[in-house]
């Protein structure tokens, strides 16, 4: 019996091996997850009003990053 040969496929842009199981795809957080993190940011700012959209967008971006964990 011959040894099993595995072939790594390099991605065209990076040249790194392609690993479909890697957690590199962006997450799609729920509105509840985004709201919780945005509220945490609001509280960290001392509950100062006026930055709700900034809090929401930054929370959403943080949760969409590859490898981001569910909060």
Image (tube, rainbow, N blue to C red):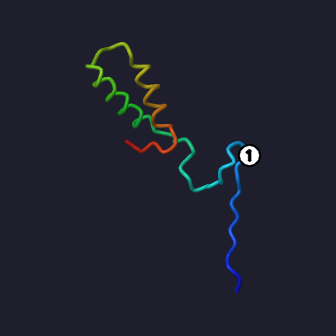
Q: Give coordinates of residue 17: x percent, y percent.
A: 65, 54
| Above or below, 55 relative to 49 | below
Q: Give coordinates of residue 10: x percent, y percent.
A: 70, 53
- Give the quarter of the figure containing the N terminus: bottom right
- Give the quarter of the figure containing the C terminus: top left
Spot the residue most to the left: 46
Spot the residue most to the top: 50
Relative to 38, 65 lies left or right: right
Q: Which residue lies at the image location 26% right of the left edge and 19% below the top edge? A: 46
| Above or below, 41 relative to 19 | above
Identify residue for label 1.
Answer: 12
| Above or below, 36 relative to 2 | above
Circle 1 crowding by C-alpha within 10 Å: few under 14, some 14–19, many from 20: few
Q: Nearer the viewer, residue 30 or 42?
A: 42
Q: Which residue lies at the image location 44% right of the left edge and 34% below the top edge? A: 31
User: Quadrant of the rendered structure where residue 53 is?
Assistant: top left
Q: Nearer the viewer, residue 63 or 22?
A: 22
Spot the residue most to the right: 12
Q: Give coordinates of residue 40: x percent, y percent.
A: 31, 29
Q: Which residue lies at the image location 62% right of the left edge and 55% below the top edge? A: 20
Q: Which residue lies at the image location 29% right of the left edge and 15% below the top edge? A: 48
Relative to 44, 68 lies left or right: right
For numbered disc 1, what is the local secondary structure? loop
């Amino acid at each position: 019996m011959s040894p099993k040969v595995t072939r790594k496929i390099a991605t065209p842009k990076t040249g790194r091996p392609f690993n479909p199981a890697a957690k590199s795809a962006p997450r799609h957080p729920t509105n509840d997850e985004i709201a919780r993190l945005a509220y945490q940011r609001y509280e960290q700012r001392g509950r100062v009003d006026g930055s709700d959209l900034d809090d929401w967008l930054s929370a959403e971006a943080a949760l969409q990053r590859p490898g981001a964990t569910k909060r």
